[in-house]
Amino acid sequence: MEPNGEEDEEGVPKVGRKGDEEEPALGIAVVGLQILRGAHPKIMHGIHGCIHFSSRSFNTHLHWTTVKIMDLLHGIGVDLVLYLQANYRNYESVFHLASSLADLHTPIFIFFPVWFHLHQKVGINLIWVAVVGDWLNLVFKWVLFGERPYWWVHETQFYGSAPPPVLQQFPITCETGPGSPSGHAMGLAGVWHVMVTAVLAANTERTHSALFSWVVRLGLWMVLAIVILLVCMSRVYVAAHFPHQVITGVIAGMIVAEVFNRVQWIYSASLKKYLYVTLFLLTFALGFYVLLKALGVDLLWTLDKAKRWCIRPEWVHMDTTPFASLMRNMGTLFGLGLGLHSPLCEQKKEIKSASFRLGCIIFSLLLLQLLDTVSLPSKSNILFYLLSFCKSAAAPFITAALVPGCLSVLFLSKNVQRNL
Ligand SMILES: O=P(O)(O)OC[C@H]1O[C@@H](O)[C@H](O)[C@@H](O)[C@@H]1O
């Protein structure tokens, strides 16, 4: 039903004809009366009108109820942002650290090299959970059309004619994608769930007393809970998210990690499979974007809002755009497949010593920090996305193939010399 030009006390347009009561029940009651009168043509017309009127009216009601509930949720969320910004100013550096820890860059450039050389399966699982989780996050964001506090306060009718609350912005505030669910919260929950369960599994393999195991278990889950809480507070503090978005992010991340805990084929997937999965995820996301674009829905609607409401243009980073994250994820997955199936990776299987593993971890971390210093030109979008793909593919390839391959040559030649 169309807006009728009248507005309610909160400025929300009223719908339906002027003077109409909008209760679906009324339409049904009118038809009931007609049936009682026995006026056949009128009954048929009335039934048709009733179904039409009540379903449209119901949909409109549902729409405006949803809008009002979301406004309320957003309003409460903004109050929490204001509360955190007023009372937790001293923790600003902790919040910034928490947000950068939760960025998917950390699992790929720091956690993966460590886990891959300590326990290969955990490293592989980590990448799959991070990549597929982030891809799902993108799809959810496109489907859910979530707002972000830093632009919502300027565009909502919620505050009527009163001035909107003033939210402080930071260099990490101006995310360019939709807000629901939080990618940081989802990625962190998934990746840390993988790491905590890996440590717990290693702990249960050892013969400790039941009390010790219980204390370790409790301690680790508490650490996870504290890290998650900090990251959630950080995303709300910087006005990038409403509280419900970080909560749903955490739940979604945990579900992704739990699902991958039960999936075994990722450990033996062939290079072909890596290629097919990468292509499937890429074409699905691009196809979804193109399809909705053809239907008149622009999934990049948030870019303009970020540019309009971010107080500093240099805080709007191109690498936070949905396509940049898609290309990074696809590059990472494909790079892992390439690395695992490279002949360089094969060589490391012959060496199991702790010093070799330690060497691999240290050199991988060093090379990845070097790779990280490479900044990509952002003048052309296509070039930026392609280079993002390549850079992301290089990270797991360096860790899984290049470093162990080169170090194993060194280790093996040393052993040969010793034996001579
Ligand atoms: O939704 P959040 O928590 O603001 O996270 C945004 C981030 O979400 C990640 O999923 C993307 O890979 C990043 O590119 C993006 O910056």
Image (spheres, grey):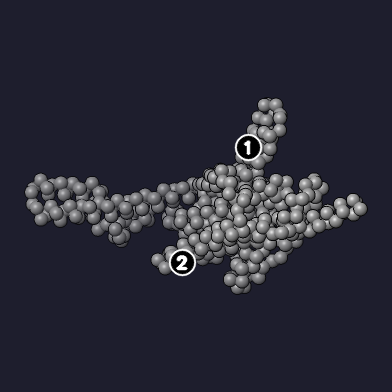
| Residue nearest the observer in this picture, 398 or 239 | 398
Q: Secondary structure at mark 2?
A: helix
- Report the amino acid beneath label 2: Val
| Residue nearest the observer in this picture, 157 or 316 | 316
Earlier residue among tags 2 and 1? 1
Report the residue at 52% width, 54% height from top: 136
Q: Secondary structure at mark 1?
A: helix
Report the residue at 8% width, 49% height from top: 38
Q: Is mark 1 within 8 Å of ligand 1?
A: no
Question: Which residue is situated farthest in the bottom direction here?
Answer: 380
219 horizontally vs 58: left or right: right
Name the spot of residue 180 as percent of width and height, x first. 50, 53
Which residue has dot 1 on it?
221
Q: Which mark is residue 230?
A: none
Residue 296, above or below 80: below
Report the residue at 14% width, 54% height from top: 44
Which residue has dot 2 on it?
290
Name the spot of residue 399 as percent of width and height, x first. 72, 56
Task: Choose mark 2 or mark 1, whichever is in front.
Answer: 2
249 horizontally vs 369: left or right: left
Report the residue at 64% width, 50% height from top: 124
Answer with the quarter of the image where residue 294 lies.
bottom left
Q: Look at the image and tell me in which quarter the N terminus lies.
A: bottom left
Answer with the quarter of the image where residue 311 lies.
bottom right
| Residue nearest the observer in this picture, 199 or 205 | 205
Q: Is residue 305 visible?
A: no
Report crowding for label 1: few under 14, some 14 to 19, many 20 or more residues within 10 A (C-alpha): some
Q: Is residue 198 visible?
A: yes
- Report the amino acid beneath label 1: Trp
373 horizontally vs 186: left or right: right
Report crowding for label 2: few under 14, some 14 to 19, many 20 or more residues within 10 A (C-alpha): some
